[in-house]
């Protein structure tokens, strides 16, 4: 029997026996390859917040919140399809959508995923979130988010990247700047790994500020015992309009006690973050045990020997 | 229990039986038969239970012993009147061809079903009795025999001076071959033609078939003539219906024959296989029950006289009904051999072990049973079983209708629900889940009685709808479901351990088309057991 007749027969059987459903092992691979917010979220042992908490401790908490908000924005886009049955299945490809977007009814969105088996235990998943004006045809699709995930030793452990191409959809006419969280954003890029400890996440963000593109880069690492670090690098203009680069590096142990240093390059066009602008060390209660600020010797408090790092 | 088939009466006549020697015409004629059975008679009638079964029995005896090859016999079961006319037209054409070849011809038309207000009722269609008679009268065959076992079909004979009598004789006139028409009806024009659950058929047809199989062979020449068969059927029908609520039923006859008209209907002189009841066996009535639980024939054995029935090879049960018990046993009839019944080897048994289907049911008809039980299900394919649809246990409810479509068949409905835990391995990640299944099926199966111990077996087809669902422990994974219809084969065993209770065991093999990831043909088996209450 030819494959054509076989296909016809199976199609007829499907109709006759009325088979339907979303019961699929293959779909699991696709759904599990999509990162959840928890896969990339910073989990610092910084639960305590007091009025007398160390200043850099509070700044680190703010950076973590910002970081997690950005991660949440990305995964929210993906979560649209994570909990839904694919609209189309074709071999190693799954498609969700297209759907008309609630917030922009003249646009529609779809998600396409492709699976490539690298080895018996390794999978590569590539996925695209695409937007297009309604009824613009296949040529109208514009990539909004590109992701890749390579798993090894299980579909839920591996390394992945996500790139949010805000500028591309903006250029295609999508009113991205109506979203307050993405207004002015040029791109967001995330790389993460959960193959084992340390769990690492790096997030880069570019934002248009007038004629200058400011960039920020977060790096987060988490050990099994709860210790970890987060750094935030920022390049932009100072209040007086001069280019400036700065880094906040926070480190902590599982109990929550830690240290943060703010360093900066005060010499334009010579990237050197060797100048320490300040240091805070804190205990498990988040209260400063050592406090230092450049040029303010009167404010120095505590014993630098109390710092864990 | 008796059911009515009403007929009109005709006056009694006694005609001397005269048999011409050496008139074994069964071997020299080209014989044709049309056998019609229809349980339904349309509006204002109750469905009959055994009309189609009577037709099948008549068809069997005519093709086995009546000198009619199957190609020359047409069985019309539960068909409209147009099929009767169509069969008559086809047979008439073939008769005409046979006559052109110089052959002598005989047409045997048997009808079992409803008749009312001068019409045969075939479902919702009708045939006027006068038209049937006219068609037979004008038929091309040299001899035309019409036998009508139906309500008030005696009207067929009324206009021609029908007779109801225990026997009739057809006088031979010289050496000329017989030509003409014979009409037999099971009851008079105003009588009910009755059915019996005890014998699993109408009285008249049952005795006519039994007679044709040999019990009517009073001349002991191993041939049964039309006269012998009628005399036997008349006597037994009148005797058995005399005490019935509907009153005695009197078969009638009429004939218009010329020539040497002795009509041998069945000839088993050259056919050895059958049942022989020796003269020393106790007198009484012996029922021969086939493997399906239907009475194939019966023998009325006088004291000191032997009897013989021609039966096809196979396994039969023998039943004698005494006042307080049954005497039952099995006998194997081997092709080409006459099996001798040794009555002493029959065993005493209570009436509940009656091998005749329905005989123990006082309110014979469709029986309903309700069962509860458990089912185990598993797919044949290992990867499917391990990671997709895990082996599952279910609890279920069964409803079965017996003898709904026809005797010996069951129509069942089953509902089951269950679940288990499973896990699926996706590239090294084990994903545990809770698996649930709901199934609803319908089964049509043929059922056979096994031996005398209350066992019966069934084989049939089942169509089920199943809904399978799994919920992963990882709540971020959406629930999955699959629903489809699956056809399958069913076999089962049933054991009656009390008057109303039976133990059930079933095995099923099903096909399932899985079409989510890809089109895959899968199979699964089920084993089920339970207890049923029969109402």
Image (cartoon, coloured by chain):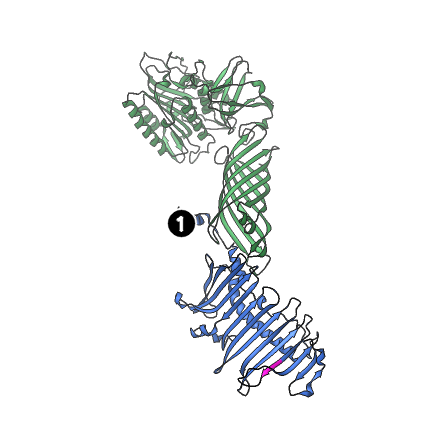
Chain colours: A blue, B green
Image point (68%, 78%), residue name: A281
In this view of the protein, which residue sits in the foreground, A193 or A58?
Answer: A193
Residue B331 percent coordinates (x, y): 53, 23
Whether residue B233 is visible, yes or no, is no
Please tell me how crowded label 1 is: few (under 14), some (14-19), or many (20+) other residues with Cα within 10 Å.
few
Whether residue A225 sits left or right of residue A233 in the image: it is right
- The chain to which mark 1 is attached is A
In this rendering, position of residue B87 left or right of residue A271 = left
The answer to whether B38 appears left or right of B198 in the picture is: left
Residue B349 at x, y = what percent?
60, 25
Residue linked to disc 1: A3
Instruction: Please provide the residue range marked out in magenta.
Output: A262-271
Quadrant containing the C terminus of chain A in the rendered view: bottom right
Q: Position of residue A230 (x, y in %)?
A: 61, 74
Q: Position of residue A249 (x, y in %)?
A: 62, 77
Label 1 SS: helix
Residue at 39% across, 67% down: A139
Main SS of the magenta segment? loop
Residue appearing at x 58%, y 77% in the figure: A232
């Amino acid at each position: 029997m030819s494959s054509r007749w076989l296909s016809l027969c199976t199609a007829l059987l499907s109709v006759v026996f009325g088979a339907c459903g979303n019961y699929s092992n293959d779909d699991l691979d696709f759904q599990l390859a999509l990162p959840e917010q928890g896969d990339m979220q910073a989990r610092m042992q910084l639960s305590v917040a007091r009025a007398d908490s160390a200043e850099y401790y509070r700044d680190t908490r703010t950076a973590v919140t910002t970081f997690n908000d950005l991660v949440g924005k990305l995964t929210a886009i993906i979560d649209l399809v994570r909990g839904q049955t694919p609209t189309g299945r074709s071999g190693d490809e799954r498609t969700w959508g297209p759907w008309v977007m609630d917030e922009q009814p003249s646009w529609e969105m779809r998600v396409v995923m492709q699976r490539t088996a690298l080895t018996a235990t390794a999978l590569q998943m590539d996925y695209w979130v695409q937007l297009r004006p309604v009824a613009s045809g296949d040529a109208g699709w514009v990539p909004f988010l590109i992701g890749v995930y390579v798993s090894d030793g299980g579909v839920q452990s591996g390394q992945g990247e996500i790139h949010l191409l805000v500028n591309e959809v903006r250029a295609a006419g999508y009113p991205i700047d109506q979203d307050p969280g993405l207004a002015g954003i040029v791109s967001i890029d995330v790389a993460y790994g959960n193959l084992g400890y340390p769990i690492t996440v790096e997030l880069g963000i570019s934002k248009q500020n007038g004629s200058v593109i400011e960039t920020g880069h977060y790096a987060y690492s988490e050990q099994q015992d709860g210790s970890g670090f987060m750094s935030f690098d920022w390049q932009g203009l100072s209040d007086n309009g001069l280019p400036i680069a700065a880094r906040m590096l926070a480190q902590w142990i599982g109990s929550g006690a830690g240290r943060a240093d703010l360093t900066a390059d005060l010499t334009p066009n010579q990237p050197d973050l060797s100048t320490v602008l300040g240091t805070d060390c804190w205990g498990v209660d988040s209260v400063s045990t050592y406090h230092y600020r450049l040029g303010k010797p009167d404010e120095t408090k505590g014993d630098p020997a109390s710092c864990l790092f | 229990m008796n059911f009515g088939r009403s007929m009109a009466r005709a006056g009694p006549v006694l005609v001397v039986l005269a048999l011409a020697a050496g008139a074994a015409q069964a071997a020299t004629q080209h014989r044709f038969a049309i056998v019609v059975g229809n349980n339904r008679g349309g509006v204002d009638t109750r469905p009959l239970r055994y009309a189609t079964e009577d037709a099948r029995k008549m068809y069997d005896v005519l093709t086995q012993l009546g000198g009619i090859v199957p190609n020359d016999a047409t069985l019309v079961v539960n068909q409209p009147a147009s099929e009767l006319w169509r069969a008559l037209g086809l047979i008439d054409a073939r008769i005409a061809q046979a006559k052109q070849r110089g052959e002598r011809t005989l047409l045997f038309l048997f009808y079992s079903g409803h008749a009312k207000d001068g019409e045969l009722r075939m479902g919702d269609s009708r045939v006027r009795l006068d038209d049937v008679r006219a068609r037979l009268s004008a038929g091309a065959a040299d001899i035309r025999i019409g036998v009508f076992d139906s309500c008030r079909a005696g009207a067929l004979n009324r206009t021609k001076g029908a007779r109801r009598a225990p026997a009739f004789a057809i006088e031979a006139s010289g050496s000329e071959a017989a030509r003409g028409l014979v009409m037999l009806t099971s009851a008079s024009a105003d009588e009910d033609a009755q059915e019996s659950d005890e014998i699993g058929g109408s009285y008249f047809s049952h005795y006519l078939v039994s007679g044709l199989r040999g019990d009517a062979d009073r001349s002991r020449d191993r041939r049964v003539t039309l006269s012998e068969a009628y005399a036997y059927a008349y006597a037994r029908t009148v005797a058995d219906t005399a005490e019935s609520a509907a009153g005695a039923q009197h078969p009638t006859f009429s004939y218009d024959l010329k020539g040497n008209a002795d009509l041998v209907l069945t000839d088993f002189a050259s056919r050895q296989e059958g049942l022989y009841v020796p003269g020393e066996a106790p007198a009484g009535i012996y029922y021969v029950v086939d493997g399906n639980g239907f009475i194939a024939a019966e023998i009325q054995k006088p004291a000191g006289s032997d009897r013989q029935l021609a039966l096809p090879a196979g396994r039969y049960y023998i039943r004698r009904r005494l006042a307080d018990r049954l005497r039952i046993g099995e006998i194997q009839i081997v092709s080409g051999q006459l099996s001798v019944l040794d009555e002493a080897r029959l065993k005493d048994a209570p009436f509940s072990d009656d091998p005749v289907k329905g005989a123990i049911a006082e309110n014979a008809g469709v029986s309903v049973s309700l069962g509860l039980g458990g089912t185990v299900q598993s797919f044949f394919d290992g990867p499917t079983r391990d990671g997709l649809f895990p082996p599952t246990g279910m609890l279920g409810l069964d409803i079965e209708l017996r003898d709904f479509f026809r005797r010996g068949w069951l129509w069942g409905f089953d509902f089951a629900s269950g679940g288990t835990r499973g896990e699926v391995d996706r590239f090294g990640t084990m994903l545990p889940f809770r698996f649930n299944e709901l199934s609803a099926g319908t089964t049509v199966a043929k059922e056979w009685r096994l031996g005398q111990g209350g066992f019966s077996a069934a084989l049939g087809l089942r169509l089920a709808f199943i809904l399978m669902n799994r919920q992963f422990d990882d709540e971020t994974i959406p629930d999955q479901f699959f629903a489809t219809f699956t056809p399958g084969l069913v076999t089962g065993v049933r054991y009656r351990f009390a008057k109303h209770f039976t133990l059930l065991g079933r095995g099923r093999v099903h096909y399932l088309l899985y079409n989510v990831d890809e089109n895959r043909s899968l199979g699964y088996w089920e084993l089920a057991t339970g207890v049923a209450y029969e109402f």
